Image: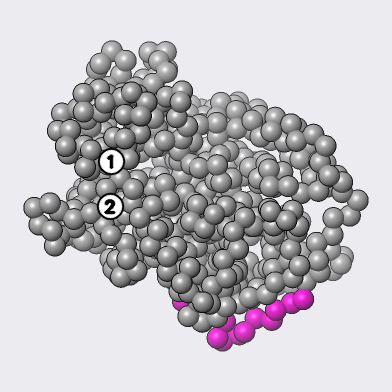
Amino acid sequence: MRHSCDFLVIGSGLAGLLFALKAAAHGTVTLLTKDALGESNSRYAQGGVAAVWDEADSFEDHIRDTMIAGAGLCRREAVEHVVRNGPRRIQELIALGVSFSRSEDEPDTYELGREGGHGRRRILHAKDQTGAEIVRALVEAVNTNPRITVTPYAMAIDLITTGGLARRQGELPPHPCRVLGAYVLDLKAQRVDVYQARIVALCTGGAGKVYTYTTNPDIATGDGMAMAWRAGARMANMEFVQFHPTCLFHSDVKSFLISEALRGEGARLLNTSGERFMSRYDTRLELAPRDIVARAIDAELKRLGADCVYLDISHQPRAYLSGRFPAIYQQCAAVGIDIATQPIPVVPAAHYFCGGVAVDLTGESSLRNLFAIGETSCTGLHGANRLASNSLLEAAVFAHSAAEAAAERLAAERPELVTLSEWDAGDAVEPDELVVVQHTWSEVRRFMWNYVGIVRTTRRLKRARRRVHLVQEEIRNYYWDFRVTGPLIELRNLATVAGLVVDSALRRRESRGLHYTLDFPESDRRWIRDTELERRF
């Protein structure tokens, strides 16, 4: 089947939902999501959204904290753009019905939390379920907007570009190359449809599932990053993968984040000897930036041969804990951990990609009319390490900037809707051994965790690169022989992202932020530059 629209939005987290709402004022919008509407990384964000909200705070303070956390690689203009526009975007979210937690003492005042790397309290939150509250409000707004067509259980396979069409015909690609739409698998009908669009917005989130242990939901398979790369978009800083320091360590629970907000309220990290250890690693103790805390925990685990460390917030009253952190309190209680009296077993886990599709201050990629917003993009805000709770802020600010720029492009140029050919399955047959996909998926995640994790070496990275190349070749052969399925598309995307992370990490011959290598343990001023990758066709 063929579908047409002005704006094609792929992904339904904060970035996709907000972009769709804003773009709908200027044209028809089709929003694709490979699961139910709103299922996204955004929905699982616990801590909150950072913004200058209190009179005691300032834009310069927030900018400085962001730049320090980014370890010298933040783009100053991107940081200023996000920080200075942040409060207005938060006001918009509130107007759309987002209910942030208020102070018990002053009901007219929002309660502001503090997290690692922030010099002041500036985290607006909805208890410990901020992402869920934001997504709830945006989903309600999208569902009542007549100009937005929502298509759930639809998984984008590949972007369609003028360059791709030209290469298929044996012609030289035009310059600049522009995006024309996407091929999309209807997961229920098991049919590939073609979507023609004037503007495409990639809002597909991150790729935490490329690692064995992650805080991300199962949908986080790097789809937007991989599609953009295959289409020829420039990528940047893929080596900077943030490992959240505190993921619940329990055999019965998978991927449950223990919010950084607990450390903001005084929670202490203890090793298996009951010793508070962060003083050996940073003077900011538990409130150091995430890269430092994650490496400190990793070092303690290796030094002691332990499976986990512990996060202790038992000094806080039970009533406060159950009220401020209800989801964490209840989840821990469900597995027999009373956080009012017991420390929480935690380990680091893959959490957030600071790199992605390289974009400008409007969110546009190197492919004309292709915008990338949220975690799938690299705006320059995060540099080598994301400051806590800046991600939801970035998504909100760039959703607005991208929607404005896309609307102007639509009005000024009215890009042509090109009639695209239907998907050609060729001689592909039904897949006969899905166990091959499952086995390869596990293999990718294991070698990425073992060789491309918190602490790296050149030898491990080269070993990972050999494995990636072998896996990618196997996937290519399997991909063209069998009909596409959701798991196969996700595996193909994960392997693509894995290759980008490894290649970027091998290029950076220093340690900076989230990229720490034992072969080059110090930072080097000569490497204060982005790691850019661009596909050669």
Q: Quadrant of residue 91?
A: bottom left
Categorize mark 2 by other alpha carbons within 10 Å: few (<14), some (14-19), many (20+): many
Query: Where residue 12 sits in the image (x, y, percent)?
Result: 51, 59
How far apart are the two marked residues, 2 and 1, measured between alpha carbons?
13 Å
**Dot 1: within a 10 Å radius of its alpha carbon, few (fewer than 14), some, or many (20 or more) residues?**
some
Question: What residue is drawn where x is 15% and y is 28%?
Answer: 315
Left or right: residue 480 versus residue 142 is right
Amino acid type assigned to the residue bearing label 1 in the image: Pro
* Image quadrant containing the C terminus: bottom right
Residue at the far left in the pictured view = 105
Residue 296 locus on image (x, y percent): 35, 27
- The answer to which quarter of the image holds residue 228 is bottom right
Q: Mark 2 — residue?
A: 125
- Tell me the element at label 1: helix
Sequence-first disc among 2 and 1: 2
Magenta region: which residues?
Answer: 403-419
The residue type indicated by label 2 comes to: His
Residue closer to the observer: 400 or 424: 424
Residue 399 visible at all: no
Of residues 315 and 236, the one nearer the viewer is: 315
In the picture provided, is 436 more to the left or to the right than 66?
Answer: right
Chief secondary structure of the magenta portion: helix
User: What number of labels is visible?
Assistant: 2
One can see residue 444 in this view? yes
Q: Vertical placement of 18 versus 296: above or below?
A: below
Query: Residue 382: percent from the left, percent from the top?
Result: 41, 51
Rendered residue at 38%/55% (across/down) = 392
According to the picture, the residue beneath numbered tag 1 turns out to be 326
Residue 307 versus residue 200 in the image, above or below: above
